[in-house]
Amino acid sequence: MCGVISYAKDDIGTISRQEGKNGWGDLTFGVLRPMNTGARTVLAPSRFAGIPDVREAEEVMFQTFKHMDVPPGPVSPPPVSFVPPPADPVPPPSGPSEQILHEQ
């Protein structure tokens, strides 16, 4: 294909990521369009190939065209740091039975 192709939100369709080593990969998306392959014309989706950080590009596409923060599917969640809450102080005794035990 030659030239620039513009896509509207409805043209994007399903976004599919193929990821290889070191985060490089391809994004396939869009409705099927006719593509000439020599003497034949086939229907094929659009594709961005050889993207260095394909997950980041996929997230940008989802944010732009699908209005989602992250793509659905098996994407690892970001790491979460856990800070334990402060220890609760020992509550003061309450009720008559506890007071009796303390008086003896």
Image (cartoon, grey):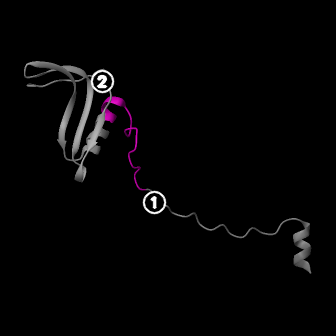
Q: Does residue 36 appear left or right of residue 104 in this picture?
A: left
Whether residue 58 is in magenta: the answer is: no
Whether residue 74 is in magenta: the answer is: yes
Specify the quadrant that holds the C terminus. Answer: bottom right
Rendered residue at 8%/19% (across/down): 39
Residue 64 image label: none
Q: Amino acid at mark 2?
A: Lys
Residue 9 image label: 2
So how many labels did they put on this image? 2
Rendered residue at 22%/43% (across/down): 25
Range drawn in magenta: 62-79
The residue closer to the viewer here, 41 or 63, is 41
Q: Position of residue 27 (x, y in %)?
A: 24, 36
Specify the quadrant that holds the N terminus. Answer: top left
Q: Is residue 39 above or below residue 80?
A: above
Q: Main secondary structure of the magenta part?
A: loop
Q: Position of residue 8 (x, y in %)?
A: 26, 22
